Image (cartoon, rainbow, N blue to C red):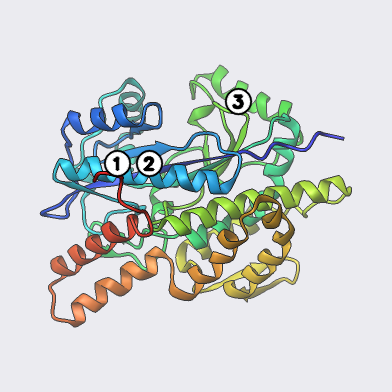
Amino acid sequence: MTPEPEFTIGIEEEYLLVDRETRDLAADPPPSMLSECEALLTGQVSPEFLRAQIEVETTVCATPAEARADLARLRRTVADVAARHGMALIAAATHPFASWKEQLHTDKDRYNLLANDMQAVARRLLICGQHVHVGIADEDLRIDLMNQVVYFLPHILALSTSSPFWRGDETGLMSYRMSVFDELPRTGIPDRFESWSEYQRLVGQMTGAGVIEDATKIWWDIRPSARFPTLEMRISDVCTQLDDAMTIAAMYLCLLRMLYRLRKNNQRWRIYPRTLVNENRWLAQRFGTTGNMVDFGRGTLVPYAELLEELLELVAEDAEAFGCVAEVAHAREIVARGTSAQRQIETFHRALDAGASEAEAHRAVVDMLIDETLAGIPAAAGA
């Protein structure tokens, strides 16, 4: 029997930097801003493809509670540094009105190569996600759990949605980020693999042919990390509120443990064709938690709120084991009061109804995002 994984957890988040006065993106932040962040958060903060973005990553954490504390510290520290430079931080997968055409990409070899290879597709990558790493040392187990947990990725995406606007347009989608990201190659739901060696053969074929340099250029919704012995979930939008971000991380962690428990009992989750999973992925992208998803066991559309209750029952034992019952249960609150995408849309229309212009309503959305990005995170000592 394969030893039980450590189920350590690490979280990466990408943020947007906005000018505090205009609420537009800070297309070219001063280098001193990043330098100050790096001095305070050694090894845990880095530039992203576009200069208006910044990424943080927690340490390897033993529990969701430990991950939450570290993520709160990272958000607060970067936000405080940004404020000292006349900027603010927003945790949203797209900006309500900024134009990708006005952005500058970071001058690093990796990003220069990406810009050259992908051209306009890369320049449009004005999007931010949340990635969750879970430690699974056994490589074949990592692949087996990846094959099975794919079924649940649309359910996770629905809870995370935070990108309803694009260049000032209300897109009608709760996660327009997915549409932008899907323009890249090697994205979406991964293939099914029988073993770690089969996955390695695929990577070897692609690197051998010269189409990618290494496995980091495979950008699936979930993938074996090329840097760590982890299974990296990448489908989710970055969540505006920290509480929501921790629900995403805790839910993913618990789903993996639930699937491992099934495996120990010689059971497994049924693996459905990618076409079917992609249909739920689209429904999550379009409607978030407000619509239906297909229950493939029943062969019918079911309200998301009903499916969520089934998910919570599936992982109840695992949430107890990890001490994250409250984080997982918070998913009900997300459904009840709306994801970030829903709240952005509501804020926009409330401002319009009060007589604001579209530009003023967009700025009101940015203000909401600024406030909610630090909601529940205490001010730094001495701040």
Mark in the foreground, 2 or 3: 2
Label 1 close to label 2 by CB (< 8 Å) = yes
x 33%, y 55%: residue: 374
Question: Does residue 333 sit above or below 73 in this rendering?
Answer: below
From the viewer's perspective, is the residue at label 1 or at label 3 nearer?
1
Relative to 251, is 37 on the left or the right? Answer: left
Q: Is residue 293 placed above or below 258 in the rendered structure?
A: below
Q: Position of residue 15 (x, y in %)?
A: 33, 45
Amino acid type, residue under disc 3 in the picture: Val
CA gap between label 2 and label 3 equals: 33 Å
Q: Quarter of the image holding residue 360?
A: bottom left
Task: Name the residue beneath numbered marker 3.
Answer: 203
The residue wearing badge 2 is 74
Label 2 amino acid? Leu
Residue under pointer 1: 78
Mark 1–mark 2 Cα distance, whole angstroms, equals 6 Å
1 and 3 marks in contact (CB < 8 Å)? no
- Say whether residue 211 is left or right of residue 144: left
